[in-house]
Image: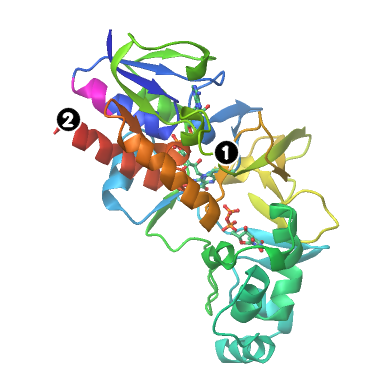
Amino acid sequence: MYDYLIVGSGLYGAIFAHEATKRGKKCLVIEKRAHIGGNAYTEQVEGVTVHRYGPHIFHTNDTAVWEYINRFAEFNNYINAPIANYNGEIYNLPFNMNTFYKLWGTHKPEKAMEVIESQRLKTENPQNLEEQALSLVGRDIFEKLIKEYTEKQWGRKCKDLPAFIIKRLPVRFTYNNNYFNDRYQGIPIGGYTQIIEKMLQGSDVRLNTDYFSQNWDDTARKTVYTGPVDEFFAFKYGRLKYRTLRFETEVLDTGNYQGNAIVNYTSAAFPWTRIIEHKHFEYGAQPKTVITKEFSKEFETGDEPYYPVNDEKNNSVAQKYFELAAQRENVIFGGRLGEYKYYDMWQVIKNALEAAEAEFR
Ligand code: FAD
Ligand code: UDP
């Protein structure tokens, strides 16, 4: 008999297991994939740390979270500064003075503001993503850097998408290419898998094991569940919507393919949304390089549910599942899928630490 059966070996499950083990509890961690780490998993290919499920850049404003994660790995000083390729024209992201200079030749913030003001859609209440984008940054940026990228990513017209998706995208009138505004940022040198391995020391781990493939009734006193919340309740209120991705990874016989870790392809002429060149996350100088093309795809049963679609309709169905979850005293629901929230890693860490704190108080 274990104290905890932990379903999923992503960051949430691993942190909970670590905190429980530290307090003398016995944990069994089951993982349906063939490896630990969830979506933060990294592996070594040609000496390069490859982010298997999309680029993972650690960033947070929370000092406690930053200090906690730094106990498990040394972080470098990587700053995320993606670029956009629009049919061969290169622009800096997020939208900043470098982008505006390239588009319009404006080198003073006031001039750039004037251009945007002259193109802006004047509306108090944008009804969809297209209106939201046009009112934030005007037509040129919308057409070259937003429209086709967003339509590739979401498989729908910008007019048919909710405005909130684009609110995440920063706009700045400084020459600052740092994508995030957070105080702490970096990549763990050698990748994320070592972090999860250390967290799982002292727990029993079973890979290739699906929670729904057998009965676990007498396994543990309590369960920590980090899989999709709708699946736990056998889709009683219907399936929640997720967005999924397809990754194509290649090893290339060149030292440097694109000169940056992330290049977004913002035109419809390319079927992928972005190309990741993994070595640049760690300033690698290996003779070969590994790149991953990322494609967006409509979710079908059997796909990995990467992103919860937190629109009104799905959030209200999720709420009904949360009410059922609250009645399950012996199950803790956590993580991106268990809570159906578009969390970054720091939020998952914070929530897992809070759950452990509440449990062991
Ligand atoms: P997960 O990592 O999803 O782990 C859940 C685990 O549970 C998985 O391993 C899954 O296989 C397992 N599982 C599910 N169901 C079962 C079952 N029935 N039985 C057994 N096991 C099961 N965050 C950042 O901070 N910065 C970034 O740059 C960033 N980029 C991202 C890019 C992409 C493409 C994606 C998808 C996410 C990104 N994130 C990023 C978010 C980050 O991945 C998550 O916040 C974090 O990994 C979530 O951890 P988790 O433990 O909640 O979930
Ligand atoms: N976006 C865009 N052009 C870009 C990058 C992003 O139009 O080059 C839009 C797109 O609609 C995307 C949203 O901004 O869904 C948020 O992008 P971000 O990369 O911040 O987050 P993601 O959802 O991809 O994790």
The numbered disc on residue 360 is: 2
Hey, which residue is sitting farthest front in the picture? 236
Element class at badge 1: loop
**Kind of residue sitting beneath label 1:** Arg
User: What residue do we see at 39% from left, 46% from top?
Assistant: 346
Residue 313 screen position, x and y as percent: 54, 54
Instruction: Locate residue 149 relative to residue 330 in the image: left or right.
Output: right
User: Is residue 35 placed above or below 92 in the rendered structure?
Assistant: above
Residue at mark 1 to residue at mark 2: CA–CA distance? 33 Å
- Which residue is at the front of the view, 334 or 74? 334
Q: Residues within 10 Å of mark 2 (few under 14, many from 20)?
A: few
User: Is residue 207 placed above or below 48 in the rendered structure?
Assistant: above
User: What residue do we see at 62% from left, 41% from top?
Assistant: 279
The quadrant of the picture showing ligand 2 is bottom right
Q: Split into 4 quadrants, where in the image is the N terminus?
A: top left
Element class at badge 2: helix
Residue 224 screen position, x and y as percent: 35, 27
The residue tagged 1 is 239
Q: Residues within 10 Å of mark 1 (few under 14, many from 20)?
A: some
For the stretch drawn in magenta, what is the main secondary structure? helix
Instruction: Locate residue 152 relative to residue 166 in the image: left or right.
Output: right
Residue 115 screen position, x and y as percent: 66, 89
- Which residue is at the front of the view, 275 or 101? 275
User: Is residue 243 placed above or below 356 in the rendered structure?
Assistant: below
Magenta segment boundaries in residue numbering: 19-23
User: What residue do we see at 65% from left, 62% from top?
Assistant: 161
Q: Split into 4 quadrants, where in the image is the C terminus?
A: top left
Instruction: Locate residue 168 relative to residue 59 in the image: left or right.
Output: right
Nearer the observer, disc 1 or disc 2?
1
Residue 358 screen position, x and y as percent: 20, 37
**Kind of residue sitting beneath label 2:** Phe
